[in-house]
Amino acid sequence: MSDQVNDPVLCPVCGKKAKTGSAIDCARHIFGTGDKPHRDWVNAQGLSFIDLLIEQATTPGNKSYQILAEVIEKARAKK
Amino acid sequence: MEKKVVVLNVNGIDYELYINPKTLLVEAIRDYIGLTGTKRGCDTVSCGACTVLINGMSIKSCSVLAVQAEGYKITTIEGLEKNGKLAPIQEAFLDQGAYQCGFCAPGMIMSSQALLNENPNPTEWEIREGIEGNICRCTGYNSIVRAVQAVASGKYTEVKS
Amino acid sequence: MNKYTVINPHEPFRVINTHVRNIDGIAKVTGRAVYTFDVKLPGMLYGKILRSPHPHAKILKIDYSKALEIPGVMGVVTGKEDTLGVKQGIWRRYKDLCDEQILPVDKVRYIGEPVVAVAAITEEIAEKALDYIDVEYEVLPAVFEPMDAIKKDAPEIHEGFERNINVTRHIEWGDVEEAFEEADYIREDWFKCGGQAHMCMETRCAVSSYTPDGKLTIYHSNQSPYYMQALMAGVLGMREGDIRIISTYVGGGFGGKFELDGAIFCSAVLSIKLKRPVKIVYTREEDFIATKRRTPMYYYTRTGVKKDGTFCAREAKVFTNGGAYTGMGATALYLTGFFHSFPYKWKAYRYDGYRVYTNTLPSTSMRGFGAPQAMWCSEQQIEWIAADLGLDPIEMRRKNAHEEGTIIPGQATIASCGIQQCFDEIKKWIDSKGQLPPNRAIGISACGFMSGGIFNWFDTPYSFSSAVVTVNQDGTVELNVGAQEIGQGSNTTLAIICAETLGVKVEDVKVHSGDTDFNPADLGAWGSRQTLMAGNAVKMAAEDAKRQILEFAYAQSGLNIVYDLDIKDRWVHAIARPERGEDFVKVVRRAIRGKDGQRIVGRGYYTPHRKGMISPAYSYMLQAVEIEVDEETGKIRLCDSLTAHDCGQPINHLGLIGQLEGAFSMAAGYGYLEYMPFEDGKLMNPNLVDYKVIRATEMPPANIAEVDTYEPEGPYGAKEAGEGLTNPTAAAIGNALFRLFGIQIKECPIRAEMILKALKEKREKEQQGK
């Protein structure tokens, strides 16, 4: 159905592969789960989980998910 | 308030009750006589679930005191069938599926029966007005209207033997 | 009055889709049916609940000593002293979302929340005792609307939920930005969708009886006895098997009776403390203010289409007023986002849903489960887009509609879909009406719905549905199911499936349901799951029993094995030679002898697999509603309607008509009558005088065109009917108003004053134009 990513991004918090394994799906997984460990990880990257969420909620488009996806990619590259 | 002896004639039987004069007819029927077919769905005389017949006319039994019903012939849902044979309106409700959860059905059937007692050939609008005081949350009423129409059309007239 | 048409009917069955009277009917029309409301046990006490007058407050001190002095008062319970303080919820997989103590220990979060429960020898004494209980509160600042509750300085309702965001849901497929690029026309609108009271005729009630052997029996008016058993075990620290839930007759549910309520919890806690049966019946007012409601929503939706009306992309953002607790609201949040895409194909689609805690009555599932709100917004906006582009609204919908084989990426594959024929039927009906009288117009609305959810956030190891079919030596059949009859006719529907499969008559089948001690677990009556899921379980169980009977019939028949045997109308026979056969009862007797005297028992179950994220099958429908508006008063009158409807193969003919008519009446109520105004967290119309539901005089004809399709996953091809039809009506009424006056109403229920205001604005605009 949808293309699976070859080298899937695993969630930096719980290690889960979200849907296709893309960074954006991982970002969706993090927002969707939204429990304390996931929130803390986002905050530890210098972002504000709740601000990103409210931004996503109140403006058209997908900006917050993209921002988080970029951060996930960066964190992954660092490893 | 001092309790009082009240004799209620329900479905042809005299019941002697010793009750508070403030007792509502519905409470007397359900809680003292134990006929639980009659329901209650509100506290504001709005839903019709407690409808019974008094001398053939429909009345919401939460709107009258038991003492006020003394000396009248009270009919509840349990009093419609005769020797295990259902009344035409009950048969029509079954055939039309004119009830679902069934909680409004006793009151709805009594209102329908009262309407037919008064007006054996009602128009569709007269039927709707006749059951306007009864809320049914399940059926959307049209099957109930069809059931009353079926009875009015003579579909369930007993064949005299 | 009503017209019922069948489009492409299937070949006739013996029992399925014939005129079968509801098997509970005699009990219901004679007053014999005993509801929880009617249950009276020896030594029974009556309970009453003291409720919070504040929308948000800390409970500092409760003094009930004076209440205990009243003669006839037997006991009092509070959250702090008499409960384990377990935070429970129906989303058991997610601990965070288990957030509700039915008797809160230290904080109340909405007006009407239970605080103390009293048991006495009469209801009057219990009621009086409430006046003698002193509760000291520290009143906290409260917030009532989701857009206020997400503000930085808003009061915190639950610890750890920043900005009061309770749950978020995101659905996305395709490249939304790119798909919007392709669009020639983009329209965005904000909508507001109201709440709605379930308003079951039987208010919440329970009779709990705890006995010294450590067992608890509860009569309770609910939609899922198994859920009640499991949830009660959780909050009481008991084993599920030590709790028995009996729910024989239930006076309506509509999505509001499958979570714990104050009646079941408080009566159980009182009974455990006092070792006597305790009955609690909610008054109508309590049922309004202290249960749950349809989820109110704020909806932003942006839709991009091509000039020719091809749909490209849609993006929606939704804030729901979650009220004080999660309940089933989390599911409604997901489903509204999913069904907002229905019944159309989108190249790309994105939905962000946010459920926000407020200090109001919790919101939850209600018939339609988020979809009526979704359709209110979607179907009106689509109508307006058609008008903006000068396109025919039926044809524009038609060219974008789902069809057999449509894939909703990552979510679902549509296996059966009859919506094209629904368009034909609606078009014919509208054309046949010709010129309408002045002040009248017809509005249409399309939708689809699920046939049971696939999700298992309840986290049970049991199958979604189970059934046991037992054949007695006289040919009578016991059908045990965990599926719950709440008036929707599931007992009858399942009896029909059993009788058809086994080859007996419907009167041979006795259905046993609504008792956890004697029936297998089942998730219960919600999400339109029973016909498909319990139906499949029953079919499997009946086939299992039938196979055992036929094995004996084969063994003794001496027929060549290429012959197939079958049972129809209590006649066991070779299909090729139906005249060669034997009476069902005789065969059954011998078969039982051959089993060393054991009755024939068939087992069946159903759990969906490989059916996507949402549901195994989807119903489709299109509705047209004719309305008349009095321009002086703004009052709407419904005049006529037609619903073209695809539920696969209808099983229970009478039940289907009843469900469709009934859903229409409830949906119409949501559209223009059933308004729940709150002031500072207080519901202003908690009674049936001020809260208006449809009455007989307001109900128009509900004509039905049944488009029969075949759903491969459903029993005999059946799928959902009766819940989905709650979805289209509000939008159809709104669309009729648009047709009539060109006004766009963005808030439901549509009240007369809103119409008057819109008409006034329209006149002013026209005058300015001159």
Image: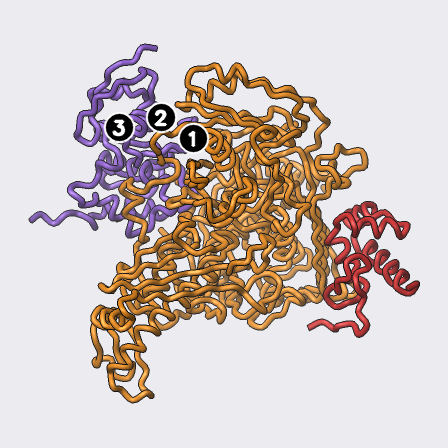
Asked whether the beta carbons under mark 1 and mark 3 sit within 8 Å of each other, the answer is no
Residue C41 picture location, percent across and down:
35, 34
* Image quarter hosting the C terminus of chain A: bottom right
C145 above or below C22? above
- Left/right placement of residue C390 relative to residue B156 reads right
Q: Which of marks 3 and 2 is in front?
A: 3
Front residue of this view, candidates C437 and C708: C708
**Residue that badge 3 annotates:** B33
Q: Residue B62 carries which label?
A: 2
Q: Locate residue C539 relative to residue C238 in the image: left or right.
A: left
* 2 or 1: tag closer to the N-terminus: 1
* Amino acid type of the residue tagged 2 in the rendering: Cys
Point 70% across, 58% down: residue = C171
What is the spatial separation of the Cα atoms under label 1 and label 3, in whole angstroms?
A: 21 Å
Q: Residue at x 29, y 18 (%)?
A: B19
The kind of residue on which mark 3 rests is: Ile
As helix, strand or loop, the secondary structure at mark 1 comes to loop
| Chain assigned purple | B
Identify by letter the chain in red.
Answer: A
The N terminus of chain A is located in which quarter? bottom right
Neighbourhood count class around disc 3 (C-alpha, 10 Å): few under 14, some 14–19, many 20 upward? some
Do the CB atoms of the residues marked 2 and 1 lie less than 8 Å apart? Answer: yes
Q: Label 1 amino acid?
A: Cys
User: Residue beneath label 1, please?
Assistant: B42
Find chain C in the image and tell me its colour: orange
